[in-house]
Image: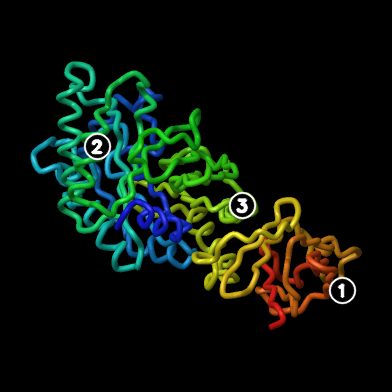
Amino acid sequence: MDKKERIERFEHLRLGLFMHFGLYSAAGEGEWAWHNLPGVRKIYGSLKEHFDPEKLDFTDILSKAREAGMRYAVLTARHHDGFSLYDTRGLSDYDVMHTPYGRDIVRLFADACRECGMMPFFYHTMHDWQHPLMQSDFDAYLDYHRKSVELLCTRYGEVGGFWFDGCWSSKTADWKLDELYSMIRRYQPDAMIINNTGLEARGVVSHPDIDAVTYEQGHTEERAAAAGEMLPAAEACVTLAHHWGYAKRDIDFRSPRSIISELASCRGKGINYLLNVGPRGDGSLRPFDAGMLEALSVWTDQVRDIFYDAERSDIDAGGRNFALEHGGRTYLFVFGFCGPESEHSASLTGSGRISLRGVGRSVKSVRWRDNGRELRFSQDGDCVTVDASGFEYGRNLIVRVAEITYAV
């Protein structure tokens, strides 16, 4: 598989699940608790001595993710606190095998991914807050880091990709990425290589071997390739609240409207969407996280058959609306329909007209995909005006999809 094929395979996955899980989950104060909270730092050693996530069930979590429309999953094999969720095989005793749990969590994750039809990706920090070699012998630290990643390359079967994070901690350091990436290519030639550029450098291509650029917290933009240029894939990664790891006192959750609107917008721009959940210290999902996956599954029901393989259309749908093409039909994604149609509604605030330009074919029919209702339309050359009805009572899918068929 060459780079173009690798990128195209990744882009057709479209939607993924991010899971931040580690010792910080047991503290319940967010994934940066060791760095930001001296009180948590003092008890971090005891977290390892008591780490036993008896409710961790990847098959259950990933089944929910698959139902929500997700096709790949990324697990924090090692975060910035330096603790590994995999067997480091003598490289360090700061891993899950030296806890009461005593089981290789990365292996459990990879096996569950394949059982659920998901592609496994491994997040791995570049920067380590606690490792003494980070300060005393950086080259020796990088050797330890490469050997750690080599274990992930060789002991868990085919890996969909490696998701690195932390080079932004030192912009002047030589992280020896050529050596790291060439080692990955040797063992996992078809794996995506992603290295998060952080909040201050969204969308930046940091190295020629990078297969996908990142947009942390969902700030995305339209991308256009120059003549003959092959763009890397792009991925927006977002949290449901403010933290990536479980934070029991962070209840400022985002709404399904926000997440689904952002997901749909990314789909229209050809950008993958990686939605994070942070399991609790016992491995269970918060009810809100599970609820968001359930809400996503309701939305993706209307687009499951076209969401992954449809391509961007040249039709101008106006505003945030956009169109995709698949199988000789056009699929119109419509934003902003807030109110239901109902005999009790004083005004049908969810109705309106949508103007399409550049259609280029004779339209035969337009219908909503969620209920099959036919919509009135008129056509004048390449311009089509659709009378878009609001949701039926009992429905509000936030971003609605209409299917346009054409005369033969």
Distance Cα–Cα, label 2 vs label 3: 35 Å
Q: Left or right? Give the position of 255 relative to 321.
A: left
What residue is at 25 percent from the left and 43 percent from the top?
51
Q: Label 3 crowding class (10 Å Cα cut-off): few <14, some 14-19, many 20+? A: many
Q: Nearer the viewer, mark 2 or mark 3?
A: 3
- The residue singled out by tag 3 in the image is 265
| Picture coordinates of residue 351, whole percent (x, y) | 83, 64
Per the rendering, the mark at residue 83 is 2
Residue extending furthest toward the front:
227
Side of 306 relative to 152 (left or right): right
Quarter in which the N terminus is drawn:
bottom left
The residue shown at (87%, 73%) is 343
Q: Secondary structure at mark 2?
A: loop
| Residue for badge 1 | 343
Cβ–Cβ under 8 Å for marks 1 and 3: no
Q: SS for tag 1?
A: loop
CA distance for labels 2 and 1: 58 Å
The local secondary structure at tag 3 comes to helix
At horizontal 35% and vertical 21% (from top left) the residue drawn is 170
Label whose residue precedes the other's in the sequence (1 or 3): 3
The disc labelled 1 sits on which kind of residue? Glu
Task: State which tag comes first along the sequence, 2 or 3.
Answer: 2
Residue 231 in percent (x, y) is at: 46, 45
**Residue toward you, 248 or 126:** 126
Tag shown at residue 230: none
Q: How is the image coloured?
A: rainbow
Indicate whether 284 appears above or below 330: above
Which dot, 1 or 3, sits closer to the camera? 3
Q: With respect to residue 288, does 92 lie above or below?
A: above
